Amino acid sequence: MRGETDLAHYNSGPWDRAGLASSNKLASSLLGPQSQTSELGLNVYRSSNSQANFSRKQCIEQQVEGENNKQEELIYVTSYDILFGQEVATSGAAEKFLMHSKNSLQSALAKLLVREKTKNIEDLLLKNHSPVCSKPRYVRVNTLKMDVETAVHGLESITKVAKDDMVPDLLKLPSGTDLHDHPLVTSGSVVVQGKASSMVAVALCPQPGWEVLDACAAPGNKTVHLAALMKGMGNIIACELHKERARLLEDTIRRTGAPNVNIFQGDFLDLDARDPKFSKIRAILLDPSCSGSGIARERLDYLLPSFKKGEDGDAANSQRVRNLAAFQTKALLHALSFPAVERVVYSTCSIHQAENEDVISSVLPFATSIGFELATPFPQWPHRGLPVFNGAEHLLRTDPTEETEGFFIALFARKSETNKSEEAPEESHIQKLPHPSTKKICRMRKPTPFLPLRKMLQYNAIPLLRHNRKRKRI
């Protein structure tokens, strides 16, 4: 479950309202201009909440109160929808109450414009500029449909465009660039996706033709990024537990035209790693449910009453974070247990050590025992893991106070896989030997099975060449 990438779905269509019950991540959809607009919506709601309606509001809040006590947040988000959104479902008590008060909300917005001496909403947003909007807007070019240069040309007509220096298919746009109805976005040629989120699939580095598993796939931005990196070749198994989110994943795949993705609706933990149908999986991307603390600013958590009251359920020492860390550890151990897997990426949009370094530290002994080691994704990246265990320097963190979301990335690789780069110089030397297709090498004695192939060639070719030189002398 990836809250940070629900943004792309919001920019290309209506919100997934089935996720309201479990989604304190809905506000992550409100980046850029929407962030400011949502804050404005909350202010309008507060100003329209007259004493005459107060008792009725209390009754409604009691009706919609759930186990997570999120009823007021639900009212705020619905207020935003009424004022600035495309549609409002009226199935719940909060929605019905607010739709009944729609005229009051719109009247309060008009009064707010007058009080702030602004002519329109755009001017009001500029006047109340929020720090969350200072970050650039990133978009990833879907290379299954369009090359980067064509995308740059298409976007330059509306805004400034710069290529990212880390992710080859990522473009950097000015903060607040509105793309929700841009043809490149609606067609799936360009995907609204943060820089840190885009680094995850690149860190896994799947090759065309590979069999890859995306363990917690919805809404699917990283899934289709994998497909693009694989040039649409090979096979990606995309797991998603929840039915509604599986539909969202399907929409993302259809919109972006990823041809090599197959959805498995079910629990990744229920997959039998020893099942023959998974025997060719070479890479796994695990981006499990997390606290989302690295994108709290983008989610506008600071606007919620619970944040103001200090009731932060995502605090590092909360029971929720401990439960999440236990699940994350279990999922990572399961990912490492697939027999043919060579590379496993574990990522979160959390800043908490409990969900990041502690998870890696707890599984590292098992990973090492079966031939894995920590590799270093993006070695030029300045921010590494917290130094809480030997090897944490291989981990990658992105800082939410800078131009990215707050992310964490760890890459496990089979030792034979990581050693390939170290052996590359020796390969160039071996290539100087006669090619195996020549007559001389074809007459070599049977290779010794316990030597590497290049050693076999070197070991067997030399006696044969000496023998031929003797024959020439005769």
Image (cartoon, helix red, strand yellow):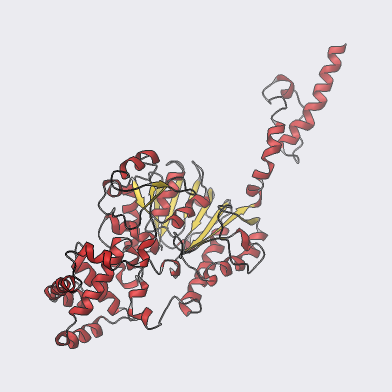
Query: Which residue: 58% across, 64% down?
Result: 385
The answer to whether one can see residue 294 in this image is: yes
Position of 214 with respect to 191 (left or right) is right
Quadrant of the image for the C terminus? top right
Identify the image quadrant of residue 112.
bottom left
Q: Quick check: 71 left or right of 198?
A: left
- Looking at the picture, does residue 404 appear above or below residue 224? below
Q: Position of residue 444 (x, y in %)?
A: 76, 26
Task: Give x and y (percent) for residue 221.
Answer: 39, 54
Quarter the N terminus occupies: bottom left
**Viewer-proximal residue, 144 or 382?**
382
Residue 322 rendering spot, x and y as whole percentages: 51, 76
User: In percent of the image, x 77 and y 36: which residue is there?
Assistant: 448
Q: Residue furthest top?
A: 474
Q: Is residue 159 above or below residue 352?
A: above
Q: Tell me if residue 447 can be seen.
A: no
